[in-house]
Image (spheres, rainbow, N blue to C red):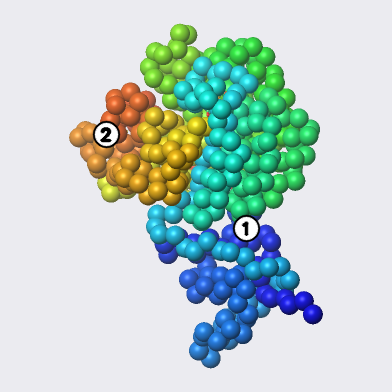
Amino acid sequence: MTQTHLQLTDEYFLKAGGDEFVLFHFDEEETKQLTQSQYEVLRQLQLGTPVDSVLDGFDRESRDHVREFLEFLRRENVLEESEAVPQEVPPPVDEPRLKLAHLDVTEGCNIACTHCYQEPYLHQGEGLSIDQIRRIVNELYWMNVESVIVSGGEPLTRPDLFEIIDLIEQRYIRVQDILTNGMLITEETIEKIRSLRSSPNIVVSLNGLTPDSDDEIRGQGTNEACKRGLERVADSDIEAHVCSVATTVNLEELPEMYEYLMDLGVKRWRVGLAQVEPDTTEEGHFDIDLDEYQSVSREIVEKHLETETDMRINIEGIFKEEVFEFGYSKYEPDSIICRYNERSCCVKPDGTVTPCTLLHDYECGDVTDEQLEDVWTGDTMREFKQTTVSEVIPEDCRTCDALEYCGGGCRWWSWNVDDTLAGRDPRFCQNMQYFVDEILPMVEERTETKPTPL
Ligand SMILES: C[S@@+](CC[C@H](N)C(=O)[O-])C[C@H]1O[C@@H](n2cnc3c(N)ncnc32)[C@H](O)[C@@H]1O
Ligand code: SF4
Ligand code: SF4
């Protein structure tokens, strides 16, 4: 007779680091936090230990609790009797655990946007081979990483993209987002994405409603092609997100773009400033007038607060939808400078590891000849990830009314323009002052009256 044992069903897996114990599911909403002893019980079962032997490790009273816990998980179809061979489970890692890896799967791209931060890597060398990516994904697995963002270059130019995604999912890592310019999205792509276990968001970069507001920056014909790709995603049941950079040629069009994206059923829209060094583009497309940016942003936020929609928006330096769920996150002097990226890092197309996608020349290591774990725990990465607000902000920020919201801003500007981590982004600074004076009171006043999203 074949022997069965109690195991997690195939949608679930265990991840742990420091004092965090997680029952992972490909659907983030199904992922649950566990106590350490719940985690240990499930880990032993996963390794093939019979239930009776697991229970033997507890006193009588605790044994009843463990039985109830296991019964509950059986009823919820989290546990099942299975004939499958017991699995390896990565042991918990030390803090800080890497939770999200941004993986640039290709150095290739089918267009050449003038603002692209990835430009130094594009069309350089051959990018990472499938064997190198397999090794990196294996490392992510042993590091207890939960999610990956797939980007590039243009990921859809890579013929074995879905093989890579399969490698990631087989190691119980969720593909959270696929970033794409959308031009190569076909019906076949849609079908392949629909069959993935992770249900990734497809994040299409689109900078305008018309060729006039986009093609100068991304090339002739790109706007039509990007919109076609986005519309294909929006017509399916895949979650479509859009990322736009504000430029001198699309700025006035952004409020109309809000309507277009909402009507299309896009679930999230992010508008940001292009992180390009001053005056580096011939036409100065990215030197936008910040007063205009603020007034256009205000128009969008006002429209948004009055609209019943489930599209979430994020306008850099001005508004984040998350305030309705979590309030504004505030910085203290000892807060880490970039909370958003505290538990993530980026593997560039040639294997260079950086603290985030934008800081492309802040090199912390190279996964083609080092272990990612060594890079993640190495001095250069730690120096960035552990730097606090008070260590980088200039003297006059210390008394600023906006400091608790701003935290000194994104490190991109100070690192790329001022050649130091300690500095301030003058554009972010100006937007933050506007946020505190104009947007914050408006949001606070309307928070109570914001219609519940559909
Ligand atoms: C580097 S691209 C890679 C994925 C894909 N090729 C695309 O265009 O979406 C990822 C995102 O970064 C944005 N991006 C590129 N350069 C940028 C910059 N200098 N500042 C801000 N965003 C930038 C793009 O517009 C796009 O939304
Ligand atoms: S499509 Fe993406 S990767 Fe390609 S040049 Fe544009 S922003 Fe860069
Ligand atoms: S808004 Fe400007 S002055 Fe104030 S904390 Fe931010 S960067 Fe410093």
The residue depicted at 61 percent of the width and 28 percent of the height is 154
Residue at the limit of the structure toward the left, as seen here = 395
Vertical relation: 3 (above or below) 224: below
Give whichever of 89, 36 is nearer the camera: 89
Relative to the observer, which residue lies in front, 446 or 368?
Answer: 368
Disc 1 secondary structure class: strand
Q: Position of residue 279 (x, y in %)?
A: 39, 13
Count of labels in the image = 2
Which of 52/418 is in front?
Answer: 52
Viewed as shown, does residue 335 lie left or right of 228? Answer: left
Is 420 or 1 nearer to us in this picture?
A: 1
Q: Which residue is mark 2?
A: 422
Label 1 neighbour load within 10 Å: few <14, some 14-19, many 20+: many
| Residue at image point 69% right, 32% down | 159
User: Mark 1 belongs to which amino acid?
Assistant: His
Q: Is residue 115 left or right of residue 185?
A: left
Q: Which mark is residue 25?
A: 1
Which residue lies at the image location 40% right of the left edge and 54% below the top edge? 96
Q: Quadrant of residue 213?
A: top right
Q: Earlier in the sequence, mark 2 or mark 1?
A: 1
Residue 123 seen in the current view = yes
User: x and y percent of residue 182 in the render?
Assistant: 66, 28
Three-letter code, disc 2: Ala
| Residue 310 in which image quadrant | top right
Point out residue 292 in the picture as x, y percentages from the top left corner.
45, 19
Q: Residue furthest top?
A: 282
**Left or right relative to 319: residue 25:** right
Residue found 23% across the figure and 33% down from its top = 394
